[in-house]
Image (cartoon, rainbow, N blue to C red):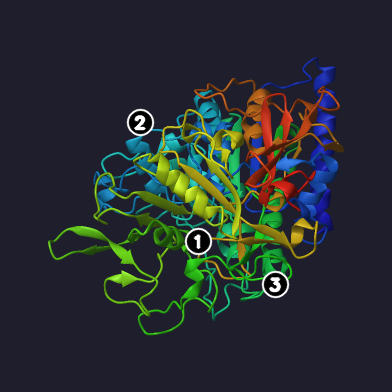
């Protein structure tokens, strides 16, 4: 591991030497920098250490250590991928979850020759993203991406790694043509590369892979998630990521160098996220949770990938001297609770869904007794509203030959042919006929995401929104409630605009966004965070998406000729700041439709100020001590907001300086 630490130091040494030589020649700042953005999915700031992540630690120590970094809320992968791609907060992109309501059933136009499906799809899928593009003008994000704009301005561009967030980096390039993907000008290599449903590669990249002895078909992920009686994976995502990093260093970067153009390459490591989600170290218990050996192996896997990329860069002194590297993670992480609500072991008391025993068709128990099932919010709300519940991820044909979504009823002791006890993926349609329509006649739509759920009210019924908020404010799993500003002030809720979720986005906007409760096994220690989660993952496995500081505190660092050395940046920064900072370095001005933009991290750049002024702030909902209140803690740099955490407390607690921990 010492060799890998030296490789990072070599990058700095060569960069300093080259800059000195350029200065002597009168050209101290080359205008065509190469850029690498490395995303370690789900890496927590506190997980970087000399044993598990020596390369990441070395960059933090030798380059820029962003000590006050932030994921955007909701703290999910593809929303933060959109922020990394565009430099905009989620109100401008409209991309607020890994699962959200499209406004139509996916593939309803026959795109990719697939049957019309769910209206709440999981978007870590290239074909689904392409379908979104088709419905929303060829670029559903409604903003130019950094990779796309760099490509248009003479850069070779690539996005390699985890399917979904990789394509988001230049999503307009995957708009389908005649039920097939075009060959994008940005190189896209992800889980489905080489398959019939994958994004194709250009001929020179295929030739380079073949010449390097690499397959043109990506290695599959092999990490079973387990069940409530069978532990999940006990290994990191080694094989798949070795393919991705080999493709990067043995085919793509050499091809880019031969083109004699500057390059911008983003590498998205699925680990440690995948290993933290699916690990089998802690079945049905909260310790070690996501701090066990499998999760740590996932961190090591990502670190090894970064070390291999750095070794390639360092092998060429000129390349090393002209390449900036930005490190980030999309979000933090926490251990899943389906049973406990605090660190004393207190159990849920308010959820209707926790009363039932959930069985499969053969009578086996799918959810432990007294534990929350996936879709507990949908079940609880349907019961509270006295409306039928349907599963948008399961379809049947009724007696009239019509396509309908499966009915859901937790009171049925075991599954029958036509009714589920809980939604398969947690999503729910409440009210309406349950028919698969081009729109929907559902009264309420729940898009389940894990640490945060998105709630849509298609007919914008004001009284129903108030009824839902009133009901949710009494549930002991709630961590915060935000409501679309158009509904006015509702007791217990803050407006969506408070967390930058209202902007110029084209996608349907949820009426209500709820995050779930977080607690700490060791008070104040973010590494021991536990999150109540609306998810299929089991108690003891990992999840994210909430507005706890454990989820918003991602890992960010930077190194290279344009960044300061040995610098600790205590100013708040976020994933929305990456694109404007890189654009500044390479001399581009990203066009924009919306105004919810990140900032250039001037304090991290050479010749920049030593610090940037910022403030800690608090926002509280409610008009009196008698109301339950959502409390939001955030920081502000000029007009840019950085969200730390939120919690749901009574008025007396809200007055404390930090009521959330």
Please tell me which of labels 3 and 1 falls first in the chain: 1
Q: Nearer the viewer, mark 2 or mark 3?
A: 3
Nearest to the observer: residue 312 or residue 504? 504
Q: Where is mark 3, residue-wise? A: 345
Residue at x 76% of width, y 33% of height:
321
- Relative to residue 32, is residue 133 drawn left or right? left
| Cα–Cα gap, marks 2 and 1 | 33 Å
- SS at circle 2: loop
Report whether residue 32 is seen. Answer: no
Indicate which label's residue lies in the foreground, 3 or 1.
3
Residue occupied by mark 2: 137
Secondary structure at numbered mark 3:
loop
How many circles with numbers are drawn on the protein?
Answer: 3
The picture places residue 567, in percent across and down from the top left corner, at 85, 36
How packed mark 1 is, by other alpha carbons closer than 10 Å (few <14, some 14-19, many 20 or more), is some
Is residue 658 among the parts visible in the rendering? yes
Closer to the chain start, of discs 2 and 1, is: 2
Residue 360, relative to residue 135: is it above or below? below
Secondary structure of residue under mark 1? loop
Q: Is residue 519 above or below residue 109?
A: below
Q: Residue 219's mark?
A: 1
């Amino acid at each position: 591991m010492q060799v890998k630490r030296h490789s990072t130091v070599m990058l700095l040494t060569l960069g300093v030497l080259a800059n000195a030589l350029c200065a002597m020649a009168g050209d101290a700042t080359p205008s065509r920098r190469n850029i690498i953005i490395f995303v370690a999915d789900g890496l927590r700031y506190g997980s970087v250490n000399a044993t598990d992540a020596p390369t990441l630690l070395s960059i933090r120590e030798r380059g820029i250590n962003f000590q006050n970094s932030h994921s955007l809320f909701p703290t999910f992968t593809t929303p933060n991928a959109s922020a990394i791609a565009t430099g905009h907060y989620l109100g401008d992109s409209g991309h607020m979850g890994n699962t959200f309501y499209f406004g139509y059933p996916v593939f309803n136009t026959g795109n990719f020759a697939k049957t019309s499906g769910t209206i709440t799809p999981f978007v870590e899928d290239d074909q689904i993203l392409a379908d979104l593009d088709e419905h929303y003008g060829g670029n559903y994000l409604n903003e130019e991406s950094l990779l796309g704009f760099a490509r248009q301005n003479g850069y070779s561009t690539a996005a390699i790694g985890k399917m979904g967030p990789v394509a988001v980096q230049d999503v307009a390039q995957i708009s389908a043509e005649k039920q097939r993907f075009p060959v994008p000008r940005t190189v896209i290599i992800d889980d489905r590369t080489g398959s019939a449903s994958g994004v194709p590669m250009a001929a020179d990249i295929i030739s380079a892979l073949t010449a390097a002895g690499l397959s043109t078909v990506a290695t599959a992920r092999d990490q079973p998630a387990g069940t409530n009686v069978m532990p999940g994976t006990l290994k990191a995502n080694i094989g798949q990521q070795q393919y991705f990093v080999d493709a990067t260093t043995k085919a793509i970067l050499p091809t880019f160098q031969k083109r004699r153009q500057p390059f911008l390459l983003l590498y998205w490591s699925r680990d440690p996220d995948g290993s933290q989600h699916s690990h089998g170290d802690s079945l049905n218990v909260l310790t070690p949770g996501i701090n066990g050996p499998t999760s740590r192996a996932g961190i090591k896997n990502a670190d090894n990938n970064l070390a291999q990329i750095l070794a390639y860069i360092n092998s060429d002194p000129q390349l090393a001297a002209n390449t900036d590297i930005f490190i980030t993670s999309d979000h933090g992480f926490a251990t899943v609770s389906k049973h406990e609500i605090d660190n004393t072991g207190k159990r849920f008391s308010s959820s209707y869904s926790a009363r039932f025993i959930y069985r499969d068709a053969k009578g086996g128990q799918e959810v432990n007794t007294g534990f929350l099932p996936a879709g507990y919010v949908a079940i609880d709300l349907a019961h509270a509203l006295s409306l039928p519940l349907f599963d948008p991820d399961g379809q049947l044909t009724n007696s009239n030959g019509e396509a309908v979504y499966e009915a859901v009823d937790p009171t049925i002791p075991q599954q029958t042919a036509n009714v589920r006890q809980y939604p398969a993926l947690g999503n729910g349609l409440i009210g309406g006929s349950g028919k698969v329509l081009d729109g929907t006649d559902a009264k309420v739509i729940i898009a389940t995401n894990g640490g945060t759920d998105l709630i849509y009210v298609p007919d914008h019924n004001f009284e129903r929104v108030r009824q839902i908020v009133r009901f949710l404010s009494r549930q002991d799993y709630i961590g915060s409630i935000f409501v679309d500003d158009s509904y006015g002030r509702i007791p217990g809720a803050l407006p969506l605009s408070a967390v930058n979720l209202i902007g110029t986005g084209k996608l349907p906007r949820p009426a209500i966004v709820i995050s779930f409760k977080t607690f700490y096994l060791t008070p104040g220690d973010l590494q021991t965070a536990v999150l109540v989660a609306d998810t299929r993952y089991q108690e003891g496995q990992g999840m994210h998406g909430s507005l706890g500081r454990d989820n918003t505190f991602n890992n960010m660092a930077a190194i290279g000729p344009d960044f300061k050395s040995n610098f600790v940046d205590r100013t708040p920064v976020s994933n929305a700041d990456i694109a404007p900072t890189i654009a500044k370095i390479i001399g581009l001005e990203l066009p924009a439709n919306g105004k919810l933009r990140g900032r250039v991290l001037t304090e991290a750049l050479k010749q920049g100020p030593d610090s940037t002024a910022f403030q800690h702030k608090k926002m509280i909902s409610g008009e009196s001590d008698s109301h339950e209140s959502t409390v939001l803690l955030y920081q502000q740099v000029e007009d840019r907001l950085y969200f730390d955490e939120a919690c749901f407390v009574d008025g007396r607690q809200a007055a404390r300086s930090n009521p959330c921990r």
